[in-house]
């Protein structure tokens, strides 16, 4: 369990010296997953639905339930992603994201997570600004839409100009280990007010080296495990969707042990110096 420091929900703990834990953010999609991640030592949560699709906007009810179930010292950052697929959104989708942002802020979210691209692959500054304006008091994270943009350095400049808190990235590679060299350049370029958070493929066995080689002070993982349904009666041949999963009686959950292993791997690692 993280420390009960009495800090306000919107506070983001930033390590300043050796022996201060680096920030571990865990993507979760349930109350049970949130509790498991926090019990394992997660410092911040990213709340989504449909993590198997990369994460979509959670329901307001889920956000409220998760906020109520974790300590106030653990920010719950809500995803704004209205559908799977690319990050080129139409006006209706943007309106839905803005409304979700407003409601999430009122419900106690500790941050928002989103990303919007233009058709040419650049970050859509105007639409990101509109999302920021919907809940200006909340820290804003640009998710891995950044990894699909055409010009990473231009995107970093845009995020700094917009006052975004952080950007989640794998270094525009399949995973953060493969993209470590690029992540290190982003850390150097981002400046003091934009945090670069490494994510994708973060595991206990690679996280310490990833932090050492990139200089990141925050890491992100989903720690996926699979649960088997407790249903004794199962109706075969009745799928719940046009493209049903391989087994509708198995679903993902958060593996607290995997989170705890990452936290432990970072515990004795000196925090990088302030930049």
Image (spheres, rainbow, N blue to C red):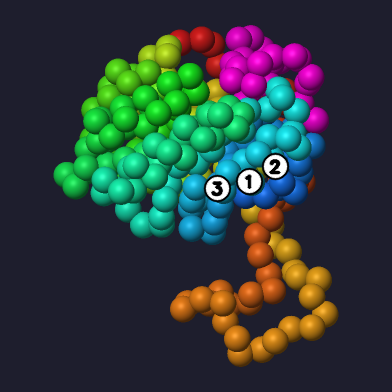
Q: Please report contact status of discs 2 and 1: CB closer than 8 Å, yes or no.
A: yes
- Left or right, 88 with respect to 49, comes to left
Real-space CA distance between mark 2 and mark 1, rounded to the nearest whole angstrom: 6 Å
Real-space CA distance between mark 3 and mark 1, rounded to the nearest whole angstrom: 8 Å
Label drawn at residue 170 = none
Above/below status of 207 relative to 57: above
- At horizontal 69% and vertical 74% (from top left) the residue drawn is 249
According to the picture, the residue beneath numbered tag 1 turns out to be: 61
Find residue 250 and report its image quarter: bottom right
- At horizontal 26% and vertical 49% (from top left) the residue drawn is 90
For marks 2 and 3, the one nearer the N-term is 3
- At horizontal 45% and vertical 26% (from top left) the residue drawn is 135
Q: Please report contact status of discs 2 and 3: CB closer than 8 Å, yes or no.
A: no
Real-space CA distance between mark 2 and mark 3, rounded to the nearest whole angstrom: 11 Å
- Horizontal and vertical percent position of residue 142: 41, 33
Q: Helix, strand, or loop for circle 3?
A: loop
Q: Quadrant of the C terminus?
A: top left
According to the picture, the residue beneath numbered tag 2 turns out to be: 65
- Magenta highlight range: 1-26
Q: Is residue 153 visible?
A: no
Q: Residues within 10 Å of mark 2 (few under 14, many from 20)?
A: some
According to the picture, the residue beneath numbered tag 3 turns out to be: 58
């Amino acid at each position: 369990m993280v420390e009960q420091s009495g800090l306000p929900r919107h506070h983001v703990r930033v390590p300043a010296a050796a022996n201060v834990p680096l920030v571990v953010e865990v993507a979760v999609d349930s109350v049970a997953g949130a509790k498991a991640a926090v019990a394992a030592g997660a410092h911040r949560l990213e709340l989504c639905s449909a993590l198997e699709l990369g994460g979509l906007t959670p329901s307001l009810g889920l956000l409220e339930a998760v906020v109520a179930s974790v300590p106030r010292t653990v920010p719950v950052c809500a995803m704004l992603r209205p559908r799977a697929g690319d990050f080129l959104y139409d006006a209706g989708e943007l309106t839905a994201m803005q409304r979700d942002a407003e409601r999430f802020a009122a419900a106690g979210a500790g941050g928002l997570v989103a990303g919007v691209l233009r058709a040419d692959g650049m970050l859509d500054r105007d639409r990101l600004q509109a999302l920021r304006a919907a809940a200006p008091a909340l820290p804003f994270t640009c998710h891995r839409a950044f990894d699909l943009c055409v010009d990473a350095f231009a995107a970093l400049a845009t995020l700094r100009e917009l006052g975004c808190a952080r950007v989640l990235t794998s270094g525009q590679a399949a995973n953060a280990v493969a993209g470590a060299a690029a992540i290190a350049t982003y850390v150097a370029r981002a400046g003091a007010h934009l945090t670069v958070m490494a994510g994708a493929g973060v595991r206990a066995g690679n996280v310490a080296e990833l932090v050492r080689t990139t200089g990141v002070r925050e890491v992100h993982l989903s720690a996926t495990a699979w649960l088997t349904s407790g249903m004794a009666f199962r109706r075969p041949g009745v799928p719940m969707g046009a493209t049903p999963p391989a087994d509708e009686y198995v679903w993902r959950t958060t593996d607290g042990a995997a989170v705890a292993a990452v936290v432990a791997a970072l515990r004795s690692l000196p925090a990088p110096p302030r930049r």
